[in-house]
Image (tube, rainbow, N blue to C red):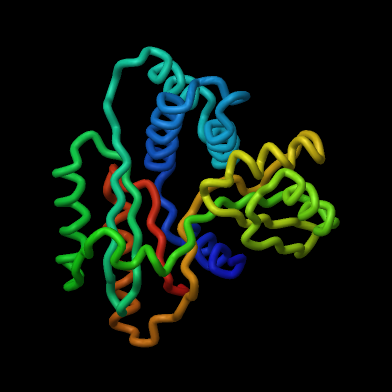
Amino acid sequence: MGRAYQNRKESMAKTSDAKAKVYSKFSREIYVTAKSGGVEPESNLALQGLIERAKKAQVPAHVIDKALDKAKGGGGEDFAIARYEGYGPGNSMVIIECLTDNPNRTFGDVRSCFTKTKTKIGTQGSVSHMFDHAAILVFAGEDEEAVLEALLMADVDVSDIENEDGKISVFVPNTEYAKAKTALIDAFGAIDFEVDEIQFLPHMTKPIENEEDREMFEKFLEMLEELDDVQNVYYDVEL
């Protein structure tokens, strides 16, 4: 699992958008997470992790506070999660996560990215069965066995644990996120999580050998990143 995560992390850095785009994505996600699970980070672990990630991405405090204030108000936009999947250039498998206030518009925009690269959007489940929907928690540490014991004592379903370069990486099913994070904090106290998020990780990754297909795939990613409603793009390609 770790290699798939690292591949995506590196490729995301290459396709990172302008700061304003990053701020907008975090603001929208913070608003939705706070509105659905509560505005207090202490009782909403998903929000807590999201705010920490936003700060590490250098999102200004006023952007975070504004999103929380909107969620407290109970009004504002009515964003919904939309997820699309299909086969992109080079026979790649792709999952696109969106937050949208207009699903018809978002579907049309995403489908256009497939159409313009001569590929086709799929039906729900067409490629997601080849991905693990996993929570990832990475933090400084050396004692892999102590971490595993703490998670097992809390009855957490652990998918994988890696110990490399003084960092522990924990992978659990997305449904185990809150339980796993709580178990780690209870066992080891305050933890500065380097990674604290939920992703789709491909079972296997592959390079695109054909140069034309590879260029088309990179163009495909750029088109998706330009869409305001797109939050995350997951794929099985090594770039």
Picture quadrant where residue 58 is located: top right
Task: Pick the residue in front: 201 or 105.
Answer: 201
What percent of the width, then of the height, locates residue 130?
41, 69
Q: How many marks?
A: 0
Q: Is residue 174 left or right of residue 169?
A: left
Task: Pick the residue in front: 70 or 127.
Answer: 127
Which residue is located at x 55 percent, y 28 percent? Answer: 44
Which quadrant would the N terminus be assigned to in this image? Answer: bottom right
Which residue is located at x 83 percent, y 58 percent? Answer: 145
What percent of the width, then of the height, locates residue 236?
43, 71
- Considering only vertical position in the picture, is 145 above or below 204? above
What percent of the width, then of the height, locates residue 21?
37, 42
Picture quadrant where residue 163 is located: bottom right
Task: Pick the residue in front: 159 or 98.
Answer: 159
- Considering only vertical position in the picture, is 189 above or below 226? above
Q: Is residue 24 left or right of residue 106?
A: right
- Considering only vertical position in the picture, is 49 above or below 17? above
What percent of the width, then of the height, locates residue 108?
14, 51
The residue most toward the top is 73
Task: Pick the residue in front: 67 or 146.
Answer: 146
Q: Is residue 42 left or right of residue 115?
A: right
Q: Is residue 137 left or right of residue 82?
A: right
Which residue is located at x 60 percent, y 45 percent? Answer: 196
Which residue is located at x 78 percent, y 52 percent? Answer: 147
